[in-house]
Image (cartoon, helix red, strand yellow):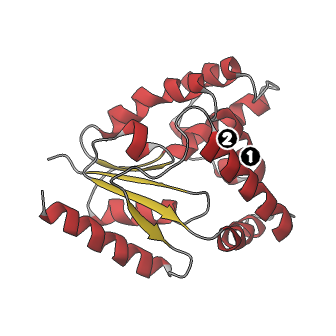
Amino acid sequence: MKLIIAIDGTFASGKGTLAKQLAAHYDLPYLDTGKLYRGIGYLVTQAGMDVHNPEHGAAMAEKLTPELLADPILKSGDVAVAASKVAVHPAVRGALRDYQRNFAKNGAVMDGRDIGTVICPDAPAKLYVDAKPEERARRRHAELVGYGEDISYDTVLAQLIERDERDMNRAEAPLKPAEDAHLLDTTNLSIKAAFETAVNIIDAILATK
């Protein structure tokens, strides 16, 4: 059995950190699929194009490179906002769908918003990671300040709530837990506790396969 661990969840819930730890623990390749959308959002804005135009976003999919996906610029707040705007377009999501499925075909940890529902619906292990908006905004604000950005907590919280609304209500592949996903609320969990809880869930799943 090819082990695919699908990790979906809300922005700044800790799913990226968790996914990296799980990839190392289970010796699997890891893909942060959000970086694909951030890369497209960045390329669209840098080209002076329109993030609301699906053709502009889809055209940038073939311009993604490993170098760009590794660039810290993709962690910025402005790029994150652009990413959530291009991600609503079916043309953009379609352009990236095969890339993600090919990455996962031999086993992987995939972190995103539609992995368990669209990209890898047959993944044996699915987690949906969430936390209260206020806690997620606190984490994201600390991250952005650490990058040197001058932004208030209230602004981060407002952007986060707006992004949740956009992610959960888009017509194409909205953010929602897969029916067979295990919910993991990290609001009051440390990074270590979240990891240990996730491993226990996944190991229990694998024991039944």
User: Would you say 73 lies left or right of 115 here?
Assistant: right
Q: Which amino acid does label 1 sit on?
A: Val
Q: Residue at x 41, y 42 (%)?
A: 117
Badge 1 marks a residue whose secondary structure is helix
Q: Determine contact: label 2, label 1, CB under 8 Å.
A: yes
93 w.r.t. 155: above or below: above
Task: List x then y, in percent, for residue 136.
Answer: 65, 68
User: Would you say 160 lies left or right of 63 here?
Assistant: right
User: Would you say 41 lies left or right of 67 here?
Assistant: right
The tally of labels here is 2
Q: Which residue is drawn at 74% across and 46% down?
A: 81
Task: List x then y, in percent, for residue 201.
Answer: 29, 69
Residue hosting label 1: 81
Q: Residue 144's quadrant in the figure?
A: bottom right
Closer to the camera in the image, 69 or 178: 178
Q: Which amino acid does label 2 sit on?
A: Ala
Q: Which residue is drawn at 23% across and 51% down?
A: 3
143 w.r.t. 171: above or below: below
59 w.r.t. 183: above or below: above
Task: List x then y, in percent, for residue 55.
Answer: 67, 17
Residue hosting label 2: 83
Task: List x then y, in percent, for residue 155.
Answer: 84, 62
> Which mark is drawn over residue 160?
none
